[in-house]
Amino acid sequence: MRPCLLIVPLAATLAWPQSHTMTQGRHRMEIMLERLDGETWHTIDPGLVLAEGDRVRFRFRTNFDGYLYVTNLNSSGSYQQLFPSERTGRTNYISGNQEYQVPATSTVFRVAGPAGYETVYWLVTPERINEVPPRGAEGAPPVPPNYKSPSPLQLIPRCDDSILRARGDCIDNTAGPKLVPRGAELPQGLAEAADKSRRDLLFMRQEDKSVISSPEPLTGPVIYEFRLAHR
């Protein structure tokens, strides 16, 4: 079984003030995974194996204007849209060099459930698309009866021994952002966009920051997944 990420209320800011300008040129996206330690949020390694009860959230920004959809597939096979949020009435339009919080409400993930991986799908596009992921959890349509949910990853997260010895952190290098495999079963509303998505994306890590970039300017949607490892 997959771990279950529960959404719990927590006071939070939906977007941060503009920070330093990102490097221009190729289209670039950044994701930072944060964990709440006491009353303070800290950016953590995207491959960090999370523990039961950890509360986490994402921070996201690009160096271009566009549109963002973030959808979580939970262990029951149903989908929950994390961005945009109907509760806030926020548009899914994003401005370059502006940081956004995911989930897009005053809530966070609380890690729960058996050891494994949770998959969060990210759809980013410079232009609005006709097909969109399902609505948020409240009032969301049921999964179509002919849709086959993706098979959960059956592996148990494993620590990189060299990092464990050097830093004392349990880091699973299979976690973090990944290109969605060809032919993968995708949540409703993402499949058509996936057919048009670029597959030559570059995935890099800069300290505790995940960087996804395109060698050429984006002219259509891109889709990738972020695997959260949990023990």
Image (tube, rainbow, N blue to C red):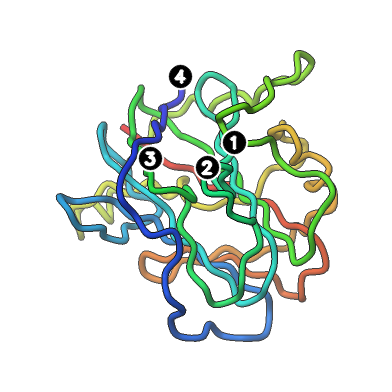
Q: Residue at x 53, y 82 (%)?
A: 22
Q: Residue 189: image x %, image y %?
A: 76, 38
**Label 3, label 1: how far apart the Cα atoms are:** 15 Å
Which quarter of the figure has residue 41?
A: bottom left
Q: Residue 32: image x %, image y %?
A: 42, 61
> Nearer the viewer's eye, disc 3 or disc 1?
1
Query: Is the residue 93 above or below the residue 76 in the image?
Result: below
Residues 182 and 5: in front is: 5
- Determine the secondary structure under disc 3: strand
Query: Disc 1 marks which amino acid?
Result: Gly
> Nearer the viewer's eye, disc 4 or disc 1?
1
Circle 3 sits on which residue?
109
**Label 4, label 1: how far apart the Cα atoms are:** 23 Å
Circle 1 sits on which residue?
136
Circle 4 sits on which residue?
1
Q: Are marks 2 and 1 in contact (CB under 8 Å)?
A: yes
Labels 3 and 1: the sequence-earlier one:
3
Circle 2 sits on which residue?
87
